[in-house]
Image: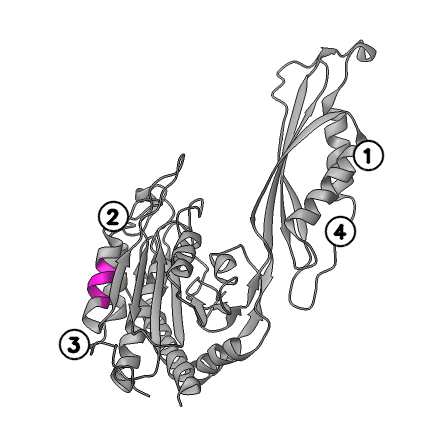
Amino acid sequence: MTDAAVRPQTAAPPDPVALARALIRCPSVTPEDAGALDVLEAALAPMGFDCTRLPFEEAGTARVDNLWARLGEAGPLFVFAGHTDVVPPGDPAAWRHDPFAAAVEDGVLYGRGACDMKGAIAAFAAGIGRFLDRRGPGFGGSIGLLITGDEEGPAINGTRKVLDWLAGQGVRLDACVVGEPTCPRAVGEMIKIGRRGSAVGRLTVTGVQGHTAYPHQADNPVNRLVAMLAAITAEPLDHGTAHFDPTNLEITTIDVGNPATNVIPARAAATFNIRFNDRHTGQSLHRFVTERFDRVGGAWSLDWRVSGEAFLTPPGPLSALVAGAVEARTGRTPVLSTTGGTSDARFIKDHCPVVELGLVNQTIHKIDEQAAVADIDLLADIYADVLDGFFGRNDG
């Protein structure tokens, strides 16, 4: 099967480490792009990719640049997804090397974004180039890259809006690999097939201020706040499922702001975060906490925000394909996991099967974030093998 719409590759595959270094040298702290997408486009264009910039913004949020790049027009469409934005580096003086210098020392690449996730994006491009070297332009489908600058930020003007734009263009995604750093110690040991959901509640309890010696003339909101928090933490929410750890509810702040020891305050507040599995939804958890708060009674309000629902791509063809590519290159059988925080896969799962595989995550968001040079090269080979398997499976 030949896709005549695919332009021929005109350059050697990108060097993944050189590309990762060029990306790291762009200080693209959310929401700044700082030239990172220009660097990536320059690597993709010689391979025949059509690149479309998709800037999005809305009131109260920063403008974010995103990139959709596609090679070919025919189906099936395999997509690599990731982000070029990074978290702030902290104190640059605390780093072994300048966080945006992309220094290589003893086979290790240092820099903000080395593993989260500019190293993986460079491996995307190199892996695609290696695949095209093997198969040529007539591989029987299309390859896309969905790259956002808003994953480490509020995730309002990034992947979700790009997906909406693609749907409006009639573009159908068939499978996706996200390059988040999924591996605890060695590349390939863990693939994410889902993620827990995340909900944040900000509870405010209102009372009546008064003297501690005359409690009958006051209404102590702290007592009720403590009782409300006890009501939602007294028992486990569940004991986990076949693919998910137990749901955990963690109280993260208790705020009264009362400097006096003899004054009952008028207000008390607390914040809690729930990381939940697929036994729950954001809506069902909202019902759970509000019912228990109502049992305590009194005046209270709750600001409730769900940043992502729990989701799962059940073990199947895509996870087997990626796991097979890992095992062939490394000899490791990856664990299929749903641990960790959330990712933009929570948006992609509404459009196609999605799994996540990237670099080692031991230093993400830390001082001296780093990735082994050999790991970046290995990941590029794995991505190339995934494409080989996907389009081999769909040939004919």
Q: Mark 4 points at which residue?
A: 236
Dots 3, 1 in contact, CB < 8 A: no
Q: How far apart are marks 3 and 4 (CA)?
A: 58 Å
Main secondary-structure element of the magenta-colored stretch:
helix
Tag nearer the camera, 4 or 2: 2
* Element class at badge 3: loop
**Residue beneath the point at 43% across and 84% down:** 394
Disc nearest the viewer among 1 and 2: 1
* Amino acid type assigned to the residue bearing label 2 in the image: Ala
Q: In screen coordinates, is 235 left or right of 34? A: right
Q: Which of marks 1 and 4 is nearer the N terminus?
A: 4
Q: Could you tell me residue 225's position as x and y percent?
A: 72, 29
Name the residue that disc number 2 marks.
34
Q: Which amino acid does label 1 sit on?
A: Arg
Determine whether the residue tagged by mark 2 lies in a helix, strand or loop.
loop
Report, in whole angstroms, how far the alpha carbon at label 4 lies from the one at label 2.
Answer: 45 Å
Which numbered mark, 3 or 4, is in the foreground of this view?
3
Of residues 268 and 156, the one drawn nearer to the viewer in this rendering:
156
- Residue 53, percent across and down? 27, 55
N-terminal label among 4 and 2:
2
Vertical relation: 264 (above or below) 163:
above
Depth check, front residue: 192 or 52: 52
The range drawn in magenta is: 39-44
Q: How far apart, in angstroms, are the residues tagged by discs 1 and 2?
A: 52 Å
Q: Mark 3 points at which residue?
A: 10
Residue at left offset 52%, top offset 63%? 349
For label 4, the SS is loop
**Dividing the image into 4 quarters, which one contains the N terminus?**
bottom left
The residue where tag 1 is placed is: 295
- Helix, strand, or loop for circle 1? helix
The disc at residue 111 is none
